[in-house]
Amino acid sequence: MVRKFKFIGSRVGKTGVAVFLTALLCDWIGWPPVFAVITAIVTVEPTASASIQKGLVRFPASAIGSAFAVLFISLFGNSALTYALAAVFTIATCFKLKLHTGLLVATLTSVAMIDVTQSNLLVAFFTRLGTTTIGLGVSTVVNMFILPPDYRDDISKNVKNIKVKTGLQIKNIFEFILNEKHENTSSVQDDLKKLDKDINQTEMLTRFQKDEAIYHPLLETEKKEFQHLQSQLGNLKLIQHHLSNLIHSPIIHLSWTESERNIILNAVQELVHSLQDETSYNAEIHATRLKEITTIFWEDNEEITKNNDIHPTNFPPELIILYELVSIYDLVDEFYTLT
């Protein structure tokens, strides 16, 4: 909640500054500020790069909206038909020209012009282009130089939270599998979906940070730290995929001995501890547990080959579980040993 409040607060603050400066500049020039303010509000984006890129789309879109408003005012005056035609033609044209991000501001500009434009339509058209330019320019400058966004702290916190949640999911899923509880997987799947949502939101923040780095470059050490976070997030996402594979695999009966189950359970517990508390990660213990489950994997594989004249077309559940567990072990080791 704290992270979201700060994020929203900075956007609102920058929007307020952009609106104030835009209205102030329009009043100084003698132009009506309403259209510039509308443009300024929708142009404050999560990154300066997005503001510039979308601004390049919103300017021609606003010009289209203004042109249709002037055209239909000259034909039908200030009437209900003028509002409808201006809105419909603006939307259709922007959509056809793929000016999607400028569609909203163009339509608002078009219909708002009708009520305030009574004469000198050509002057009104160029005035609207001028106010739109002011709104785009001011909001972009504000977004670049006032509280420029930096998402690295949020990304770092999210990666740590996702790491802990991933450890909990590993514990729940393997206990679920080893105890052979197959009657209801919906709760486990719901938890995995929530984990996937957290990962996707954090990936979105990394994209924002990469875009922002175009105009606010990171120092070399900061760049390495950010790349390290991206790699860790990628490892956690792959672990989530392996856990999803386990849930959706047809695991009906497991033929492991009690000793083998205990080895696997101990390996799972070591994984959980290392993810939930990074200080408990021990490379030597990690390698030992990995060797133990890898040994079981190859023994099971050899047993299946030896006891079947015809090789099975589907992997047995024991091999599926061990393959996914070994893969997760490798990813956790990579998570902590990345430099």
Image (spheres, grey):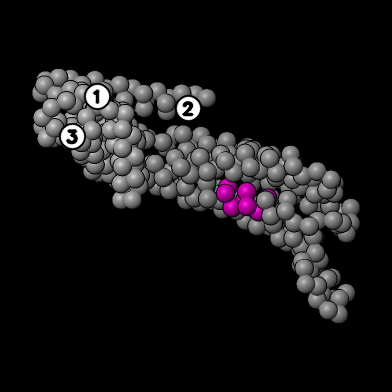
- Place of residue 73 in the rendered image (x, y in percent of width and height, measured from the top left): 21, 32
Instruction: Tell me which segment is drawn in magenta.
Output: 236-243
Left or right, 184 with reference to 69: right
User: Could you tell me which residue is drawn at 89 percent across and 52 percent down?
Assistant: 258
Residue situated in front as seen by the camera: 268 or 74: 74
Mark 3 — residue? 74
Mark 2 — residue? 4
Q: Residues within 10 Å of mark 2 (few under 14, many from 20)?
A: few
- Give the residue type that dot 2 points to: Lys
- Which dot, 1 or 3, sits closer to the camera? 3
As drawn, the label of residue 134 is none
Q: Is residue 205 visible?
A: yes
Relative vertical location of residue 209 with respect to residue 108 in this rendering, above or below: below
- Give the residue type that dot 1 points to: Asp
User: Could you tell me which residue is drawn at 18 percent across and 22 percent down?
Assistant: 32
Going from N to C along the chain, the mark reached first, 3 or 2, is 2
